Image: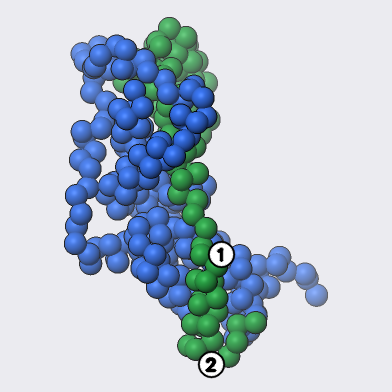
């Protein structure tokens, strides 16, 4: 039986929704709610976009010179070359 | 003789003091270690120190790795712990009060607020707005202002792609705690972006 969800319910369920781990009846209720709630559609979309952008902005590369210093550091500490 | 998976072979060689195995593991993991360390500490010098310590620890303490979890999880755990300890020793900067950025609800479960704002969907806007330099700067600042343990969860899940179970194992927390912090952190980040872009 489809669950009738409020906006609060929908937002509370977002982590599980994005992981596709909602039980079928709950998923049906979730998607049913989105069909008539523009505010929740906006929330879900911007929540998903935030997650995507977070992965992008935080994906910083290790500086080249740091990698070289790392090898030298281990050589100094271990007394033998890592490579 | 059974052919072991590549990483198991590297671990065996590392146990025998093979520094070339360490180099191979550095190639595989140093970028991830740096990303997580920098993401938590927000400081290049601290991140570099942590990267060095993680690989030194890996070489010296590989015998304590029992293989109950994946080596990557072990490495993430050492990295996250080191980064969070470093942050604890520093002056506490102004962290955002998460409650200020979480949705409020009316009786009946509707979100409270101006309807136009509630329905604002910047995710659908052209890329240069939704993903432009300003947007990234706002998000970067919002990430920096999260409490450290919340930022650590977000980085493990949304940057490194760990599952809830893996992130919980890395941080020594329950899955429920990880999911709760993740959700609150994402909501806080989303809200700061929405206020800036609407």
Residue under pointer 2 = A79
For the residue pair B109 and B101, the one nearer the viewer reads as B101
The quarter of the picture where the N terminus of chain B appears is bottom right
Q: Residue furthest right?
A: B1
Q: Is residue B150 above or below residue B105?
A: below
Chain letter tied to green = A
Q: Which mark is residue B29?
A: 1
Secondary structure of the residue carrying tag 1 is helix
Q: How many circles with numbers are drawn on the protein?
A: 2
Q: Is residue B15 above or below residue B44?
A: below
Q: Which mark is residue B43?
A: none
Q: Quadrant of residue B23?
A: bottom right
Could you tell me if residue B175 is visible in this image?
no
Q: Is residue A66 above or below residue A29?
A: below
Q: Residue at x 47, y 58 (%)?
A: B35
Q: Residue at x 46, y 35 (%)?
A: B132
Report x, y in % for residue A4. 39, 11
Q: Quadrant of residue B102?
A: top left
Q: Quadrant of residue B116?
A: top left
Report x, y in % for residue B188. 31, 35
Q: Is residue A15 above or below residue A40?
A: below
Report x, y in % for residue A47. 42, 29
Q: Give the distance between the C-alpha atoms of the residues marked 1 and 2, in whole angstroms.
A: 22 Å
Q: Residue at x 35, y 32 (%)?
A: B193
Colour mapping used in the image: by chain
Q: Is residue A75 left or right of residue B144?
A: right
Q: Which chain does the residue under circle 2 lie in?
A: A
């Amino acid at each position: 039986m489809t669950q009738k969800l409020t906006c609060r319910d929908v937002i509370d369920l977002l982590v599980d929704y994005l992981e596709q781990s909602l039980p079928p009846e709950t998923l049906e209720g979730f998607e049913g709610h989105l069909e008539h709630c523009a505010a929740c559609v906006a929330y879900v979309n911007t929540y998903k976009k935030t997650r995507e952008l977070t992965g992008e902005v935080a994906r910083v590369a290790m500086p080249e010179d740091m990698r070289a210093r790392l090898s030298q550091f281990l050589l100094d500490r271990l007394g033998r070359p890592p490579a | 003789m059974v052919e072991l998976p590549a990483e198991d072979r590297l671990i065996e060689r590392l146990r025998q003091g093979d520094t070339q195995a360490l180099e191979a593991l550095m190639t595989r993991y140093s970028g991830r270690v740096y990303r997580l360390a920098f993401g938590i500490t927000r400081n290049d010098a601290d991140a570099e120190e942590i990267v060095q310590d993680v690989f030194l620890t890996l070489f010296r303490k590989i015998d304590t790795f029992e293989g109950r979890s994946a080596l990557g999880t072990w490495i993430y755990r050492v990295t996250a712990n080191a980064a969070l300890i470093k942050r604890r020793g520093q002056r506490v900067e102004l962290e955002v009060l998460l409650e200020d950025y979480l949705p409020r609800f009316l009786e009946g479960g509707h979100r409270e607020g101006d309807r136009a704002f509630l329905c604002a969907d910047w995710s659908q806007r052209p890329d240069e707005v939704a993903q432009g330099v300003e947007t990234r700067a706002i998000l970067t600042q919002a990430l920096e202002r999260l409490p450290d343990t919340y930022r650590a969860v977000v980085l493990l899940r949304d940057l490194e792609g760990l599952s809830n179970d893996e992130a919980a194992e890395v941080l020594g927390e329950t899955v429920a705690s990880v999911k709760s912090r993740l959700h609150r952190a994402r909501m806080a980040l989303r809200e700061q972006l929405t206020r800036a872009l609407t």
